Image (cartoon, rainbow, N blue to C red):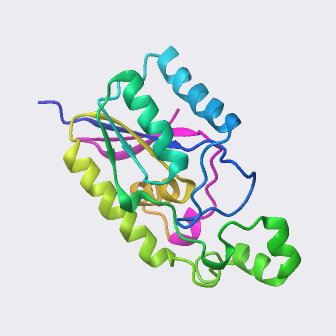
Amino acid sequence: MNTKTVIDLLRHGEPEGGRMYRGGGTDHVLSEAGWEHMHASIEKRIEKNEAGWQAIVSSPMLRCKEFSNHLAEERNIPIQVIENLREAGYGSWEGRTPAHIKEQSEDEYWEFFADPVNNRPADAEPLEFFTPRINEVFGEVLTQYQGQHVLLVSHLAVTRAIIGIVLGMPLASQQLIDMPFAGMLRIINDRKGLRLLLL
C-alpha cells in the first residue's frame, strides 16, 4: 500500500486590479498576466515530469477556482473546492492598496507589520481563528487523499499556515514567509512524517 502523500501548494497568479489587500471578502479574477503565471508554473512541473496530480483541491475564491477548473478539465483531473481554504479576511483593509492605507493611517500600517498577529486591521479575521481553520482542512485533505499526489491551489496566508503546521512555527514567524504569485512548494507525508520540499 502506498502511504506516501504528496501535496503541491500553488499560490494563485496576479489578480486584476494590481497590488492590494485581498482577503476572503475581495474576489477578483486573475489578470492576463496572472493566467500566464499559473500556466508557466504548471508547465515547469510538466517539463520536470512532476505533474502527476490525481486530484485538485481549490480555494473557492475566483483567483484560484477559475484556473483550477480550467486545469482539471484540461488534464481530466477530479477537483474539489473547499470553502474553508478561502483567504484570511482583511477587514477594513479589504480591496485597498498599501499606498492608500499608508496615506490614510501610516501608524496603523506600520503597527500591522510590527505585530501582524495582534495588530490586525479592524474587523479582520484573527490569525488565532484562521490557522485552526486551515489546520482542520489540511488534516482532512491528508486523510481524504492519503497515498495520492494532489495539487492544492490557494493563497499566501493559507500557504503560510500550512508551512507553520508542518514546521511547528508560531503565528508571528509564519507572517515572515513570502511567496511569489504562482509560486509552488511541496508537502510530503509518509512514514518519516510531514516535511517540506522546496521545488
The quadrant in which the N terminus is found is top left
Q: Is residue 82 magenta?
A: no
Residue range in magenta is 171-199
Q: Residue at x 57, y 64 (%)?
A: 23
Q: Position of residue 27 (x, y in %)?
A: 57, 58
Q: Position of residue 55 (x, y in %)?
A: 31, 35
Q: Position of residue 15 (x, y in %)?
A: 65, 47
Q: Nearer the viewer, residue 6 or 82?
A: 82
The answer to whether residue 181 is left or right of residue 62 is right
The answer to whether residue 169 is left or right of residue 195 is right
Q: Up-down: is 30 above or below 20? A: above
Q: How many marks?
A: 0
Q: Quadrant of residue 115?
A: bottom right
Q: Residue at x 64, y 30 (%)?
A: 36
Q: Quadrant of residue 123?
A: bottom right
The answer to whether residue 168 is left or right of residue 96 is left
Q: Residue furthest right?
A: 103
Q: Nearer the viewer, residue 157 or 25?
A: 25
Q: Residue at x 38, y 27 (%)?
A: 73
Q: Residue at x 60, y 64 (%)?
A: 175
The answer to whether residue 114 is left or right of residue 1 is right
